[in-house]
Amino acid sequence: MKEKLKSEDIVKDQTMGEQMWKRYTVEVRSRKRTWLMKNNRGTQTGEEQEQVKGEQVLKRYRTKETREEQEQMGGEQV
C-alpha cells in the first residue's frame, strides 16, 4: 500500500514539475518579447512601429495643411 502511494506521489510531482516548467518558459518568452519591444534592438517590430508613427504624424500634418488651404479658399471666394 505504501509503495503504491509513493509511486503515485512521484508521478504527481513529475507532472507538477512539468507544468511549472511550461509556465516558466512561457513567462520568460513573454518577458523577452516585451524587452525587445521596449528597447528596439534592431527588431523588425520596432522599426515597423516607428514607421507607422511617422506616417501618422505626416497624416496629421497634411490634414492640417488642407484645412488651412480650404479656409483660405473659402475666404477668397467671399
Image (cartoon, rainbow, N blue to C red):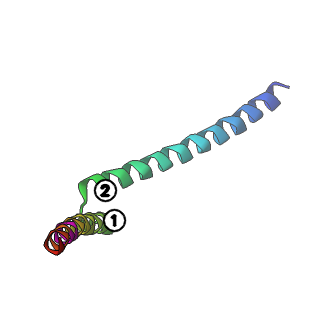
In the rendered view, would you say 40 is above or below 62? above
Could you tell me which secondary element the residue under label 2 belongs to? helix
Q: Is residue 30 left or right of residue 69?
A: right
Query: Which residue occupies 19% across, 67% down?
Result: 71
Could you tell me if the residues under marks 2 and 1 are in contact, i.e. CB atoms within 8 Å? Answer: yes
- Asked if the stretch drawn in magenta spans residue 68, the answer is yes
Looking at the image, is 78 positioned above or below residue 2? below
Residue tagged 2: 36
Residue 47 pos. (x, y %): 26, 67
Q: What residue does disc 1 label? A: 45
Residue 58 quadrant: bottom left
Give the extent of the magenta segment. 65-70
Which quarter of the image is occupied by the N terminus? top right
Residue 78 part of the magenta segment: no
Magenta residues, dominant SS class: helix
Taking the image as shown, residue 75 lies to the left or right of residue 46, namely left
Residue for point 31% across, 56% down:
36
Q: Residue furthest right?
A: 1
Q: Amino acid at mark 1?
A: Thr
Question: In the rendered structure, which disc, 2 or 1, sits on the residue that comes first in sequence?
Answer: 2
- Residue 32 locus on image (x, y percent): 36, 52
- Residue at the far front in the pictured view: 78
User: In the rendering, at what x and y percent does residue 54 appear?
Assistant: 23, 67
Nearest the eye: 41 or 21: 41
Question: Mark 2 against mark 1, which lies toward the viewer?
Answer: 1
Image quarter in which the C terminus is found: bottom left
Residue type, label 2: Leu
* Near-viewer residue (58 or 16): 58
Q: Residue at x 54, y 44 (%)?
A: 23
Whole-number angstrom distance, CA of label 2 to CA of label 1: 9 Å
